[in-house]
Amino acid sequence: MSDAEVIRKPDDDARVFLVVVDNSEEMQKALRFASHRARHTNGRVALLYVQEPTSFSHWLGVDELMREEAREEGEALLQALSEKVEKLSGQMPVVYIREGDRGEELFAQLEEDPSISIVVLAASSKGGEGADPIISHLIGKGRGKMHTPFTIVPGTLSDEEIDGLS
């Protein structure tokens, strides 16, 4: 999928805080930080869900079924996170759905949507190799493509500490 499917479009003049959605604990930290920053700056939160391509190409029907199931799971996750963002920020978020490599799709989204002001990520509290694939992508292959500021929230922060920062 080359262009993102946009479920809700941002206001033209609002600062947009983009959070890349996954099931990690640290993503919840980034979501909380972005939501509070949006509330305090009259901005908006945007959620980017990137569906990884399926690699089961032996039977086309099975591959398509796996893609549909992953899409449904992503939409359910986005729905739950949208409700959380609305409670924390006071507004429903902008929602984008893409398919492909998460790092590459993040940069493609940033190129396609100049309304995104900042990307908010959270570093894993677990540490170790490969714990933060998007952050690794940023400091590796992606560093030459960065034209939007990124904020990295430590995954070790408590909700109260995040609320105090934002």
Image (cartoon, rainbow, N blue to C red):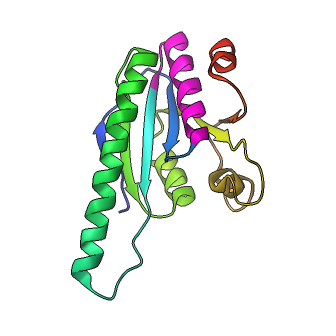
Q: How many marks?
A: 0
Q: Is residue 107 magenta?
A: no
Who's the residue at 35% across and 26% down the image?
A: 83
From the viewer's perspective, is residue 42 above or below residue 68?
above
Q: Is residue 108 left or right of residue 123?
A: left
Residue 116: x %, y % from top left:
50, 34
Read off the magenta span. 25-44
Q: Is residue 119 visible?
A: yes
> 48 or 61, which lies in front?
61
- Answer whether residue 30 is magenta in the image: yes
Q: Quadrant of the N terminus?
A: bottom left
Task: Say whether residue 20 is left or right of residue 162.
Answer: left
* Camera sees residue 5: no
Q: Provide residue 59's location: percent of width, then percent of height.
A: 27, 86
Magenta span: predominant SS is helix
Q: Position of residue 126 (x, y in %)?
A: 73, 47
Q: Nearer the viewer, residue 32 or 3?
A: 32
Residue occupying the point 34% across, 59% down: 70
Extreme residue toward the right, this view: 128
| Residue at point 69%, 44% (across, down) | 124
Residue pictured at 54% horizontal, 13% vertical: 41
Q: From this viewpoint, which residue is outermost toward the left?
A: 61
Q: Nearer the viewer, residue 19 or 72?
A: 72
Q: Residue furthest bottom?
A: 58
Q: Quadrant of residue 77?
A: top left
Q: Which quarter shows the C terminus?
A: top right
Q: Indicate the position of residue 61 as horizontal and vertical percent values.
A: 21, 79
| In the depicted structure, whether residue 29 falls above or below residue 13 | below
